[in-house]
Amino acid sequence: MRARSALPAAALMATAALTLSACGGGSGGDGDSTISPVATATTSAAPTATSAAPSAAGAPLTVDPALALPADLKLDFDWKLPADATQAGVLTASADFMQSMVHGVVRQNVKDATLNTYAQGAAYTYAKQYVQLHIDAKKTLTGTDHFYRPVVKLLAKNSAAQVTFCEDQSKLYSKEVATGKAHVTGADDRNYVSYQLVLSLFRPGTQLWRAQAITTKERALECKQ
């Protein structure tokens, strides 16, 4: 997730143009942030059965229960599962990946095991940098983060997939870890972010997927609802 940060521009450049999620201070820059796939050997747990057994077509998406968040924080995935089991598995894994990053922020733990459960390679690097930014700033998250308009494109004989979707962070806020103070801000075009994820099939013959690469675009006005 991208949004504003109180960190200086140099610090943002050093972390692949990542910025802190949620409102509360601005770094100012617009544009795309891309981390492409890289050859990386990682040892990680297999995704859970939530990706292997998605719900019936049209049902609301359900993330891995291991990614549960505090009562004051919610990721709202306004995504209905399609009839196609492969596309449903891809969407579920995409949501799990996004929530795993927030789970790491809440736990203030860049080594949170859920990070490499749902990501490898460049996506895993992105996730760790995202969590580390919040740890360094001594901030967590509160409020509701809204995700919508998902589009799934299957690739490489259904062994890879590309997912695009939108995010509205207008009700998601940063919160001081030490004091619990939330930094609430108003409407801003930087609340709108578009994403492109590339995922690969974790194991042939299953619907277990992992994110491999992520591209984000801040001030994505095409995402305005």
Image: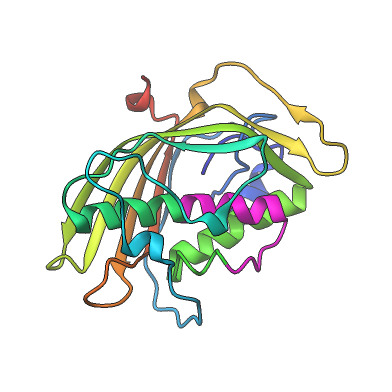
Vertical placement of residue 207 versus 106, above or below: below
Vertical placement of residue 48 versus 140, above or below: below
Spot occupied by residue 127 in the image (x, y as percentages of width and height):
54, 58
Residue at position x 59%, y 69% in the image: 113
Q: Is residue 109 magenta?
A: yes
Q: How many numbered dots are placed on residues in this image?
A: 0
Which image quadrant for residue 216? top left
Q: Left of 24 or right of it: where is 169? A: left
Q: Left of 184 or right of it: where is 3? A: left
Spot occupied by residue 223 in the image (x, y as percentages of width and height):
35, 27
Spot occupied by residue 128 in the image (x, y as percentages of width and height):
59, 62
Farthest-out residue, left: 157
Spot occupied by residue 63 in the image (x, y as percentages of width and height):
45, 51
Q: Is residue 96 magenta?
A: no
Vertical placement of residue 218 versus 11, above or below: above
Near-viewer residue (21 or 73): 73
- Region of the chain picked out in magenta, as a range: 97-113
Near-viewer residue (221 or 69): 69
Residue at position x 36%, y 53% in the image: 92
